[in-house]
Amino acid sequence: MLEGDSGRRYAESLMVHFRRVERLKQEAVQCPSVDLNARQVCDLELLLNRALYPLEGFMGRGDYECVLDSMRLEEGTVWPVPICLDLPEAVASRLELGGLLGLRDPEGFLLAILQVSDVWAPDKTREAEAVFGTSDPEVHPGVRRFLEQTHPFYVGGRIEGLHLPQHYDFSQLRLPPSETHRRFSQNGWRRVIGFQTERPLHCAHKEMIQHAAREVGASIFLQPVVGHGVWGRVDHFTRVRCFQEFAARFPRNMIDVGLLPMALRHAGPREALLQAIVRRNFGCTHFMVADDQADPYACQNGAERFYPQYKAQHLVQEYAGETGIDMVPLKHMVYVEDKAQYLPQDEVPEGMRVKEISSRELERRLEFDLQIPEWFSFPEVVRELRVAHPPRHKQGFTVFLTGLSGAGKSTLAKVLYVRFMEMRDRPVTLLDGDIVRKNLSSELSFTREHRELNVRRIGFVASEITKNGGIAVCAPIAPYEDSRRLNRELIEGYGGYIEIFMATPLTVCEQRDRKGLYAKARAGVVQGVTGIDDPYIPPSDPELEIDTSEMTPTEAAQEVLLYLEEQGYIR
Ligand SMILES: Nc1ncnc2c1ncn2[C@@H]1O[C@H](COP(=O)(O)OS(=O)(=O)O)[C@@H](OP(=O)(O)O)[C@H]1O
Ligand SMILES: Nc1ncnc2c1ncn2[C@@H]1O[C@H](COP(=O)(O)OP(=O)(O)O)[C@@H](O)[C@H]1O
């Protein structure tokens, strides 16, 4: 670490001098390179700007093993979470120890050069057990993402930075550690308390943060995470605008806001400790920690947490002497109606009435255009949320019909299309299985891989339509749960997603046999027909289930419309 201008200590970035940039660029021509994904770019940026000090590159195998076993780097420094670069076998097999690897952004722009010190195939189950406390993807969504989305090989080595990742959004809030150190010193902030958040903040948070800051006599560095893995329905731009409005509610010179491009893992206590170390590197002296910090279920009201309550706080506290940053516990605040003020939950006088609005209830009020009281949030924050989160009847949505050939998908989709067009309030697009197969997916066959790809393509188009406030009516067979789940996850981020299982039995579909497909399958002329010699996995939790054996298309459409009306999507 280097000495800053007023006694604060910070490390110099890993960016090289511009003359060396040219040399490295020339060397990169000869060496293999890899286009990083969004998660990896986040890690790289924090390595380059030294938010992950003392790391000087992606971890090698020695550090990796030590971190898993004892939460320390080989040389002894406390470090809770591996920071490794994962690669597919095709790239890993081309690397030589001591050789160079170019690290590019997703568009191929060269950001850094890594000198390869280690390449290995990690035991991901062991890593998940050590870092997350489980390797079961069913009980921990962070583990699921880790197991599904990390490549099988790791490469470690020191890095030299040529260019920092480009951010065109909110550039005035992109503060690297060198800049926060400078600002804190300039403002005369001896004590700075860091606060990490992913979600928009309201009145209770202001009270909570102010309460914590007062306890230690510190100024506040509000550092929302805007990197990879942020969950929730509020889009990036709205969230940041909400944070700006929120910060404007504090006394001047008491708060500063900076965005942190960090890849979230939701690894509970270990991740909380990493967050604390990062804040130390930004110049904070204290860090606020919730009793469920970095828990994968932390933001879900009512959901049971994965990690034991307070474990994150205890771990950050336990290592405070070594990390050099103190833990300040966050107190849950509630609005005490009889006093017209917020109090920590455990300090509410007996018998007093308290009020709270859960995040699910807030979402419901936004969805249905209902009142949000001023004791709960600031009008400026609510205004931002309402712009981004129009009531359901103004949102886009996708109706996704899935079922066997002949189940009635296309017919129902056509009736719905007409009904929505008659309403004339949103643009409507019909993505029928046959039409998509002719245009978007003309080169695809009916293998599992191609069917999944076809369904994902439909999901992507539907998500764009939904994002822009339109109605997408999709009608593919979509026989597999995986692609349907991924579509749901994607589209629910933008608006409504209504999955309708067309549960018409095979016998009825076969009798209808509009296209003669079943006859051909039975005669052995065509192979791999869904329902005959190819699987159809029924949805496990569809919004609606419709069996068209004993109802007309108009009646089926009416069922869907009644559901949409009840849910507030149409009126
Ligand atoms: N082997 C096989 N299995 C199933 N279906 C077949 C097959 N070969 C051709 N067809 C015709 O293609 C239509 C289904 O295409 P989809 O794109 O909806 O299928 S999938 O979602 O990709 O599984 C489907 O149309 P619908 O009857 O409208 O469902 C079939 O007529
Ligand atoms: N309630 C209903 N909804 C949809 N289709 C029905 C219904 N009742 C009978 N049908 C008939 O069933 C057939 C379904 O064919 P289609 O809509 O092309 O199915 P898919 O798109 O699922 O292959 C059509 O001939 C349609 O007229």
Image (tube, helix red, strand yellow):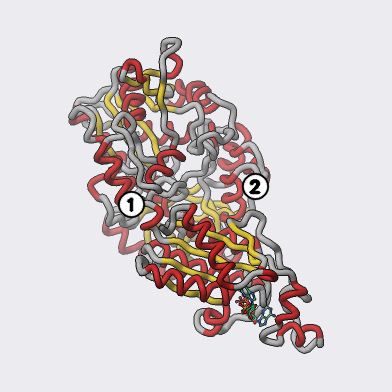
Amino acid type, mark 1: Ala
Q: Position of residue 141 (x, y in %)?
A: 58, 46
Residue drawn at (46%, 59%) of the image: 37
- Name the residue: 54% across, 38% down: 297
Q: Residues within 10 Å of mark 2 (few under 14, many from 20)?
A: some
Dot 2: element: loop
Q: Of all residues shown, which one is farthest toward the top?
A: 350
Ligand 1 visible in quadrant: bottom right
Q: Residue at x 39, y 35 (%)?
A: 196
Q: Quick one: 114 or 452, which is closer to the camera?
A: 452
Q: Amino acid at mark 2?
A: Pro
Above or below, comparing residue 414 to residue 91 in the picture: below
From the top left corner, tell me how far across and down residue 454 is, in percent: 57, 73
Label 1 Cα crowd, 10 Å radius (few <14 / some 14-19 / many 20+)? some
Nearer the viewer's eye, disc 1 or disc 2? 1
Residue 228, relative to residue 378: is it above or below? below
Q: Work out whether residue 105 can be spotted.
A: no
Assign the N terminus to one quadrant of the image: top left
Viewer can see residue 302: yes
| Quarter holding residue 63 | top right
In the picture of the structure, the residue carrying the numbered disc 2 is: 137
Q: Which residue is pictured at 41% across the width and 61% down the height?
A: 396
Residue lying furthest right: 523
Q: Residue 308 at x, y = what percent? A: 59, 27
Mark on residue 388?
1
Q: Is residue 163 above or below residue 344?
A: below
1 or 2: tag closer to the N-terminus: 2
Q: CA distance from mark 1 to mark 2?
A: 32 Å
Out of 470 and 94, give the one closest to the viewer: 470
Q: Of 84 and 2, which appears nearest the observer?
A: 84
